[in-house]
Structure formats: C-alpha cells, structure tokens
Image (cartoon, rainbow, N blue to C red):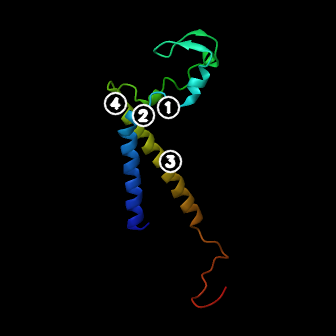
C-alpha cells in the first residue's frame, strides 16, 4: 500500500477514535424515536419509568448481554461516566477496525494466488 493510502487510513482511524472517545459523550441521551413510539399510550415520570397506561414498552425485557462489560454504552467498573462512555467508543472503533482489516487481509491473500490461465502478456502484444 502506498504511503498516501496509509496516511489516509491512519487519519480516518484517528478521526473515528476522536469522535468515539470524546464527541460521543455529547450525544443525545434519547437518540431514536423507537423508544418514544413504544411509550405511546403510557404515562411516564421524569426518569422515563412507566407509571400508568398501556403501551408496547411494558413488555420490554433486558437483553441477554445486559450484564456484559460493555453494556449500556459504557465500560463496567469505570466510575467516571465520561471516561466510561469514551472508552467504550474507542474499544468499539478498535474492534471494528481490527475485524475489517482482518477481513480485507484475508480477502487480499485469497485473491493474490495466480491461476494456471493467468499468464502475463508481453508488452505490445494484444490478448
């Protein structure tokens, strides 16, 4: 890979790490409309706990991985919520980058083997 490609890749990774580590802490605590649409028909208090009515959100259950180390956009065991959220974002970017890079590396290695019919044609000759 050319030096320019490495610089572009490193710059993109740096921007993604910066966004995940710092800017993610300033995202909305209510990012999507799914939660609000599931609460239609219910009465909720200031902490978004259902206190009355009837709505689909009453059947919600915790996910099987709710007790995992990276659940709820944070890292379990880190007391500072700003650091916890930033660290979980950075870990997510690094894991995603590693999986993507590994996949591209495997595809590149797989496609690099020449076959018997792939003979280079001499310069100036038509194929």
Q: Which residue carries the number 3 mark?
A: 99
Q: Nearer the viewer, mark 3 or mark 1?
A: 1
Given contact means CB atoms under 8 Å apart, are the residues at marks 3 and 2 in contact? Answer: no
Expressed as whole percent of the image width and height from the top left, the position of residue 58 reads: 61, 15
Q: Which residue carries the number 2 mark?
A: 27
Which numbered disc, 2 or 4, marks the residue that appears first in the sequence? 2
Which numbered disc, 3 or 2, marks the residue that appears first in the sequence? 2
Q: Residues within 10 Å of mark 1 (few under 14, many from 20)?
A: few
User: Label 3 to label 1, Cα distance in Å?
Assistant: 26 Å
User: Label 1 to label 2, Cα distance in Å?
Assistant: 8 Å
Which numbered disc, 3 or 1, marks the residue that appears first in the sequence? 1
Where, by quadrant of the figure, is residue 4 drawn?
A: bottom left
User: Label 1 to label 4, Cα distance in Å?
Assistant: 17 Å
Given contact means CB atoms under 8 Å apart, are the residues at marks 1 and 2 in contact? Answer: yes
Q: Secondary structure at mark 3?
A: helix
Expressed as whole percent of the image width and height from the top left, the position of residue 11 reads: 37, 55
Residue 82, which numbered label? 4
């Amino acid at each position: 890979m050319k030096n320019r490609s490495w610089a572009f890749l490193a710059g993109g990774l740096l921007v993604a790490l910066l966004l995940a580590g710092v800017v993610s802490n300033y995202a909305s605590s209510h990012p999507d409309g799914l939660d609000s649409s599931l609460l239609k028909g219910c009465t909720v208090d200031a902490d978004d706990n259902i206190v009355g009515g009837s709505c689909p959100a009453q059947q919600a259950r915790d996910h099987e991985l709710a007790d995992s180390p990276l659940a709820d956009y944070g890292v379990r065991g880190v007391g500072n919520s700003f650091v916890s959220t930033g660290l979980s974002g950075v870990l997510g970017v690094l894991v995603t980058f590693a999986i993507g890079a590994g996949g591209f590396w495997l595809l590149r290695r797989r496609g690099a083997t020449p076959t018997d019919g792939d003979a280079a044609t001499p310069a100036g000759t038509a194929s």
